[in-house]
Image: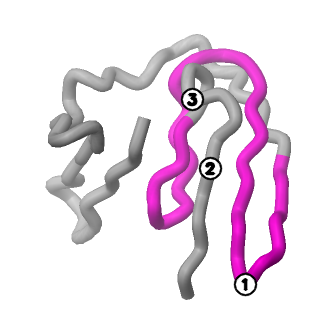
Amino acid sequence: FNIIWLSSNTDVAIVTMDGNVIGLSEGETIITAIYDGSEYRYLIKVRSSSKTDLSKWIEKKGRYYYHNPYGKKTFYFDK
């Protein structure tokens, strides 16, 4: 599938190219999935007071990468 994922407020949450949503701070954002000419939008509310530490992500040419040592996936997103 070729799905494009977007977050309307990247200060609150980001979405990886695989569609995984990562909360960064409390608030609301709209996650949009674009597939085959159609757009699907979902309102996401992040309520946790803890923030994601982006210092554990590796930034390379404007794209952030995170490799989970316990899993097989490497997540990345464009900010």
Residue 18 coordinates in the image, percent (x, y): 47, 66
Indicate the colouring scheme.
one colour
Indicate the secondary structure of the residue bearing disc 3: loop
Q: In this image, 16 relative to 47: left or right?
A: left
In this view, the residue in front, 39 or 75, is 39
- Label 1 near label 2: C-beta < 8 Å? no
**Rendered residue at 78%/31% (across/down):** 45
Quadrant position of the N terminus in the picture:
bottom right
Indicate the secondary structure of the residue bearing disc 2: strand
Q: Which quadrant of the figure has residue 55?
A: top left
Quadrant position of the C terminus in the picture:
top left
**Residue 36: mark in rendering:** 1
**Residue 6: mark in rendering:** 2
In this view, the residue in front, 70 or 15, is 15
Q: Amino acid at mark 3?
A: Thr
The mark nearer the N terminus, 2 or 1, is: 2
43 versus 49 height, above or below: below
**Rendered residue at 58%/17% (across/down):** 25
Q: Is residue 18 magenta?
A: yes
Overall secondary structure of the magenta section: strand
Q: CA distance from mark 2 to mark 1?
A: 15 Å
Q: Is residue 67 magenta?
A: no
Q: Residues within 10 Å of mark 3 (few under 14, many from 20)?
A: some
Q: Which quadrant of the figure has residue 9?
A: top right
**Rendered residue at 60%/58% (across/down):** 5
Residue 52 coordinates in the image, percent (x, y): 41, 24
